[in-house]
Image (tube, grey):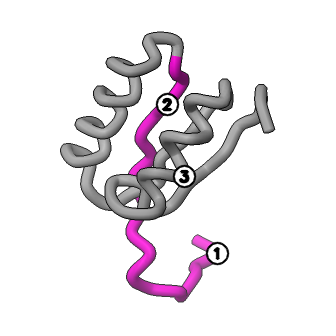
């Protein structure tokens, strides 16, 4: 998979981090949907050190509740 946009949740650590890294290295634009902005931006910086053309961005999400609102 290359040239696509991917959203990876929990991408600041563990499996999510490795998935996001692999997707970036393959030439995809990756949105890291995470809770911790500082930790996620550190991961993005590492991606860009290894692959300067990596397209990665932080999106803050908190998936602690599965209740949705129409407002």
Residue that numbered label 2 is attached to: 56
Label annotation for residue 19: 3
Going 31% across and 45% down the picture, which residue do you hit?
Answer: 40
Q: Mark 1 and mark 3 in contact (Cβ < 8 Å)?
A: no
Q: Looking at the image, which is closer to me, 46 or 57?
A: 46
Going 56% across and 32% down the picture, which residue do you hit?
Answer: 24
Q: Mark 2 and mark 1 in contact (Cβ < 8 Å)?
A: no
Q: Looking at the image, which is closer to me, 31 or 68?
A: 31
Q: Which numbered mark, 3 or 2, is in the foreground of this view?
A: 3
Image quadrant occupied by the N terminus: top right
Q: Is residue 67 magenta?
A: yes
Tell me which label, 3 or 1, sits earlier in the chain. 3
Q: Which residues are magenta?
A: 54-71
- Where's residue 34, x and y in %? 39, 57
Tell me which label, 3 or 2, sits earlier in the chain. 3
Marks 1 and 2, how far apart at CA = 29 Å
Q: Looking at the image, which is closer to me, 67 or 30?
A: 30
Left or right: residue 11 compared with residue 37? right
Label annotation for residue 21: none
Tell me the quarter of the picture where residue 50 sits.
Answer: top left
Going 52% across and 12% down the picture, which residue do you hit?
Answer: 53
Marks 3 and 1, how far apart at CA = 32 Å
- Where's residue 62, x and y in %? 39, 69
Main SS of residues in magenta: loop
Left or right: residue 5 compared with residue 40? right
Tell me which label, 1 or 2, sits earlier in the chain. 2
Marks 3 and 2, how far apart at CA = 12 Å
Q: Is residue 59 magenta?
A: yes
- Tag 3 secondary structure: helix
Residue that numbered label 1 is attached to: 70
Q: Which numbered mark, 1 or 2, is in the foreground of this view?
A: 2
């Amino acid at each position: 998979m290359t040239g696509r946009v991917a959203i990876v949740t929990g991408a600041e650590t563990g499996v999510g981090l490795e998935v996001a890294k692999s997707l970036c290295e393959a030439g995809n634009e990756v949105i890291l949907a995470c809770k911790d902005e500082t930790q996620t931006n550190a991961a993005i910086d590492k991606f860009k050190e290894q692959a300067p053309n990596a397209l990665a961005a932080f999106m803050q999400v908190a998936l602690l509740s599965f209740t949705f609102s129409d407002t």
